[in-house]
């Protein structure tokens, strides 16, 4: 090797400068040449998942997916469009991403409006995941780990829906990637891109904060980690200080803006925690009077059992989730024992969902039910998906360590390990699909009564004249309007509080048709003010409240448009 080339080979890895060397035992930053094929393969997986789920009608199984689409739709399609329609519990970024797609009526009705952004997030998430594990593992193990992550059937299913998990997992993966790269640059004294890196990390934190509440914890943890790293470093020039201030402002801005939004529109900055649509209120409403609390209530031990078991079943087939968890814990222990290099410090943040959900289950009124544990039902099973990146990364760290341990004594076995792991990633996918993955199964079970009920209401709505005002509470069964293709601005609902309150005081005078579902505010208003209403039909299905359809006898004839 010449003296001129020697310094080049000793340079710290940099994603913009490190060429593809092809060394099968090199751990370094990923190159564009490597990441593009991974992204292209993930596009193929995404399209196959969309084909399967669209053809089988899986995209609208979750009531939350239907509600997310409805929230996105009413931002522009409502009697009072605008920022007030974002809601006060669900964070707004997923809905804002759906707005351009959900205004197309057909895409709103079939769920494609939520699939497009989720599929894009899946592709970006897989690319980011490969970029992350390539910093920790040699190519063969990075590829096997990425395959295991990308082929998870629960993730593939969620990537075709309007649920928030694909977006949040993508933001978490990229947040960890950018953080570890920033820490490495600080350690190497590479400051040329550091200012822009800090601002970009702040933007990703801002997006995570406005996607899920665990994003608030990730943002705080990343800020603390970077602040501590920069404080300890003596290589940083003072010109980085303004960028760190901007990074701090962006990080803090997300929670502050959400508190201000809740205060402005709902007169309580903590409405998302204690308002009528909060987890506490839902748990109180769905728990029968005198019934005991769910297991895990104020019990961290049971919360740990439920959440880790849920995460295992979300990630792996049958009982192999136990092996995956043990391997991940072994990889975590190996990482800690190996020292806290920058890449490892950042990667350990992938375990943050564990304490977050332990607290949420124990003290946040967020139960998790899976069929493997009493009461053997389905509720919030998708929350275990937050641990998929941590389980995958650290399980494959452990497998890579096992390969190194076997290399001297059992070289043939060591060479077979990566290939075996890659094959098992595909086997895990096929077995989970054969027995129906947990998240999809939860959607199927919980939709078994809701969809027939909303379809029955939709058939009644389709018989109404076009454009007539309909008084209906939209928060629980907006899927009926979605299936019927009724524009939301045609309804008088809680989305416009002033007109809704006036309508509840005299239903017959403010709408031609009234849809009252037992227990909702409209049903209570009809019971209190029945004058001028003629009952047209009663719709009841198993497992759902009855809906009563009324026609007003007083609503002005001049208001009624022509028949369809």
Image (spheres, helix red, strand yellow):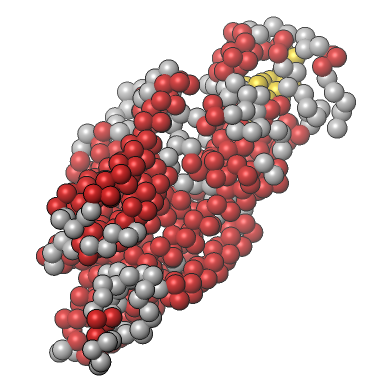
Where on the picture, by quarter, is residue 260? top left
- The residue nearer to you, when weighing 489 against 377, is 489
Q: Tell me where residue 139 appears, x and y as whole percent.
A: 34, 78
At x 85%, y 23%, the residue is 561
- Residue 176, position in %: x, y? 32, 56
Q: Nearer the viewer, residue 353 or 301?
A: 353
Identify whether 97 is placed above or below 477: below
Pick the residue in front: 147 or 548. 147
What residue appears at the point 49 percent right and 68 percent down from the top-left corner?
39
Q: Quadrant of the N terminus?
A: bottom left
Give the side of residue 478 with respect to residue 244, left or right.
Answer: right
230 vs 465: above or below: below
Which residue is most to the right? 562
Residue at 38% over, 23% down: 269
Left or right placement of residue 16 versus residue 191 in this view: right
Q: Position of residue 335 (x, y in %)?
A: 18, 65
Numbered-mark total = 0
Asked if one can make out residue 249 in the rendered structure from this viewpoint, the answer is: yes
Q: Where the C terminus falls, by quadrant?
A: top right
| Residue at horizontal 70 percent and vertical 42 percent from the top | 105
Tell me if residue 238 comes above or below residue 389 in the rendering.
Answer: above
**In this rendering, does residue 157 appear at all?**
no
In the visual, does 359 lie left or right of 47? Answer: left
Residue nearest the observer in this picture, 375 or 244: 244
Q: Position of residue 473 (x, y in %)?
A: 59, 24
């Amino acid at each position: 090797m010449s003296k001129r080339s020697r310094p080049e080979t000793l340079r710290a890895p940099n994603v913009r400068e490190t060429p593809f060397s092809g060394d099968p035992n090199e751990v370094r930053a990923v190159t564009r040449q490597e990441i593009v094929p991974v992204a292209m393969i993930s596009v193929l997986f995404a399209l196959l998942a969309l084909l399967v789920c669209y053809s089988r009608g899986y995209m609208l199984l979750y009531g939350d997916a239907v509600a997310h689409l409805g929230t996105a739709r009413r931002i522009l399609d409502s009697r009072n469009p605008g920022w007030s329609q974002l809601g006060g519990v669900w964070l707004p970024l997923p809905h804002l991403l759906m707005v351009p797609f959900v205004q197309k009526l057909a895409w709103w009705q079939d769920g494609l409006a939520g699939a497009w952004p989720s599929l894009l997030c899946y592709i970006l998430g897989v690319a980011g995941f490969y970029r992350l594990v390539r910093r920790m593992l040699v190519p063969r193990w990075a590829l096997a780990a990425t395959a295991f992550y990308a082929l998870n059937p629960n993730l593939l299913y969620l990537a075709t829906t309007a649920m928030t998990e694909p977006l949040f997992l993508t933001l978490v993966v990229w947040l960890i990637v950018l953080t570890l790269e920033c820490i490495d640059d600080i350690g190497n004294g590479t400051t040329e891109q550091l200012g822009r890196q800090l601002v970009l990390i702040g933007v990703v934190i801002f997006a995570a904060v406005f996607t899920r509440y665990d994003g608030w914890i990730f943002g705080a943890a990343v800020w603390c980690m970077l602040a501590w790293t920069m404080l300890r470093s003596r290589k940083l020039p003072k010109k980085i200080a303004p960028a760190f201030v901007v990074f701090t402002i962006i990080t803090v801005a997300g929670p502050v803006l959400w508190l201000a939004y809740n205060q402005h529109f709902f007169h309580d900055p903590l409405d998302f925690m204690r308002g009528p649509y909060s987890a506490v209120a839902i748990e109180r409403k769905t728990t029968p009077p005198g019934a005991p609390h769910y297991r895990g209530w104020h019990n961290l031990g049971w919360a740990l059992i439920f959440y880790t078991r849920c995460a295992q079943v979300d990630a792996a087939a049958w009982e192999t989730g136990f092996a995956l968890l043990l391997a991940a814990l072994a990889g975590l222990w190996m990482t800690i024992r190996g020292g806290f290099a920058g890449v490892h410090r950042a990667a350990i943040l992938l375990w943050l969902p564990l304490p977050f959900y332990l607290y949420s289950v124990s003290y946040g009124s967020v139960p998790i039910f899976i069929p493997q544990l009493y009461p053997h039902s389905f509720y919030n099973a998708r929350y275990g998906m937050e641990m998929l990146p941590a389980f995958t990364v650290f399980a494959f760290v452990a497998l890579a360590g096992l390969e190194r341990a076997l290399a001297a004594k059992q070289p043939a076995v060591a060479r077979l390990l990566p290939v075996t792991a890659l094959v098992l990633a595909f086997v895990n996918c096929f077995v989970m699909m054969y027995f129906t993955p947990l998240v999809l199964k939860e959607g199927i079970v919980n939709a078994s009564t809701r969809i027939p009920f909303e379809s029955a209401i939709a058939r009644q709505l389709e018989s109404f004249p076009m454009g007539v005002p309909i008084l209906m509470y939209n928060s629980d069964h907006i899927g009926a309007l979605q299936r019927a293709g009724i524009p939301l601005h045609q309804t008088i609902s809680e989305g416009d509080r002033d007109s809704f309150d006036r309508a509840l005081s005299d239903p017959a005078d403010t709408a031609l048709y009234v849809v009252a579902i037992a227990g909702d505010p409209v049903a209570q208003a009809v019971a209190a003010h029945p004058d001028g209403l003629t009952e047209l039909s009663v719709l009841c299905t198993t497992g759902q409240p009855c809906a009563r359809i009324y026609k007003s006898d007083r609503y002005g004839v001049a208001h009624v448009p022509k028949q369809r």
